[in-house]
Image (spheres, rainbow, N blue to C red):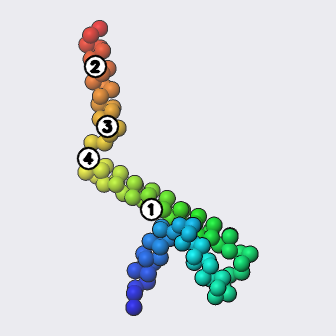
Amino acid sequence: MRSLFEQSVLAGIGLLSMTHEKAQKIVDELIRRGEVQKDEAKDWVESLVQRGEDERQSLRKLIHDEVKSSLDELGLVTKQDLQDLASKIETLGRQEKE
């Protein structure tokens, strides 16, 4: 038997990969079983697709935040740091020529 955590992770991965086609197949199966009415199908499909997109966006933000936090902790140079340094060098070069 799978743990609740493992089931949650797998369900989340399923939501992340939810496409309109997959959502339609799921809703079609629910209609076939009588668990969803045909007139509700479009709303269900749109809801599943939107939930999948929301989950993807949340995961992207989480990954971005974690990577940024790790870079900050490691003290690695970022692209912005390099751009700032190049700007300062350029400013100093202009001042020296004056």
From the viewer's perspective, is 77 left or right of 41? left
Above or below, comparing residue 57 to residue 30 in the picture: above
Residue where numbered disc 4 is placed? 75
In the rendered structure, are the residues bearing label 4 and label 2 in contact, judged by CB atoms less than 8 Å apart? no
Depth order, front residue of 73/7: 7
The type of residue carrying mark 1 is Leu
Residue at the extreme top of the image, as rendered: 98
Q: Quadrant of the N terminus?
A: bottom left
Q: CA distance from mark 3 to mark 4?
A: 11 Å
Residue at 62 percent across and 83 percent down: it is: 30
Q: CA distance from mark 2 to mark 1?
A: 42 Å
Check disc 4 and report its element: helix, strand or loop. Answer: loop
Q: CA distance from mark 2 to mark 3?
A: 17 Å
Residue at 29 percent across and 31 percent down: it is: 85
Residue at 68 percent across and 70 percent down: it is: 42
Residue where numbered disc 2 is placed? 92
Depth order, front residue of 31/86: 31
Q: Residues within 10 Å of mark 3 (few under 14, many from 20)?
A: few
Residue where numbered disc 3 is placed? 81
Residue where numbered disc 1 is placed? 59
